[in-house]
Image: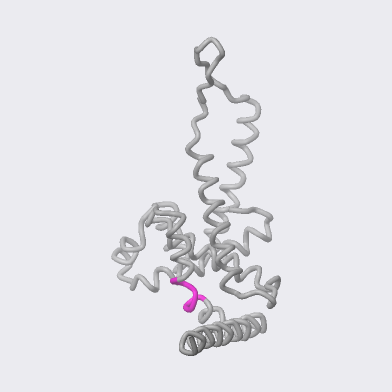
Amino acid sequence: MTDQSNIIDKKEQKRAESIREDHEMIRQALDGEQDAYARLMKKYHDPVFSVVFKIIHDKEEIEDLVQETFIKAFASLKSFNENYSFSTWIFKIASNNCIDYMRKKKLKTLSIDTTIEQEEGETSFELPDPSYETDKNIIEEQRRKVIQDAINSLPEKYRVVIQMRHQEEKNYDEISEILCMPIGTVKAHIFRAREMLNKYLRDKRVFI
């Protein structure tokens, strides 16, 4: 029983030390120390990856969702409550991010010509309102233009990787091979590019 208690005490002590370490890194990050963000990401990249992997099984999307999770977390870091652990907070952000992704993906793949069962056993089609579609297309076109302007505003090294990833739909390995760049550098450039895009689009009140 004593040995078991010692094991529990050590685990609790280790957890408390980890939380204190997180809170210190968060304070440093909020004070403008960029290295603190990097250390937080290094510490929680694999745990966040595991959370995302349990929800999303598309290997091509997991790393993107992980990066988006950190971007959202770092953008909201001022709202972090130190009464809670950083791990619990960022895992919740990761889960919500995955749910948003699945919801958007479902909407994109939903057929416009949805079959509807009738009482008589026949089927008909639910047709969209043309005027609604016209307005929607205009809004989407404006939105695409703002996003493209944001991409064009990026420094070249970030613009190239973000175009290859999201416009040409290349995976990380392909980008690494084409640019003769370590895959870690590719991921870092894409992460930084997304940070810059999110800031640009927030200022324009556009959300992606």
**Residue 130 occupies quadrant:** top right
Residue 17: image x %, image y %?
Answer: 56, 87
For this rendering, which residue is in front, 35 or 82?
A: 82
Q: Which residues are magenta?
A: 41-46
Residue 68: image x %, image y %?
Answer: 53, 62
Q: Residue at x 54, y 59 (%)?
A: 95
| Magenta stretch: helix, strand or loop mostly | helix
Q: Residue at x 68, y 56 (%)?
A: 204
For this rendering, which residue is in front, 119 or 77?
A: 119
Residue 137: image x %, image y %?
Answer: 59, 36
Q: Number of marks in the image? A: 0
Q: In the drawing, does residue 181 fall left or right of residue 53?
A: left
Look at the picture and state if 120 lies above or below 99: above
Q: Residue at x 62, y 30 (%)?
A: 134
Q: Residue at x 58, y 57 (%)?
A: 96
Look at the picture and state if 191 lies above or below 114: below
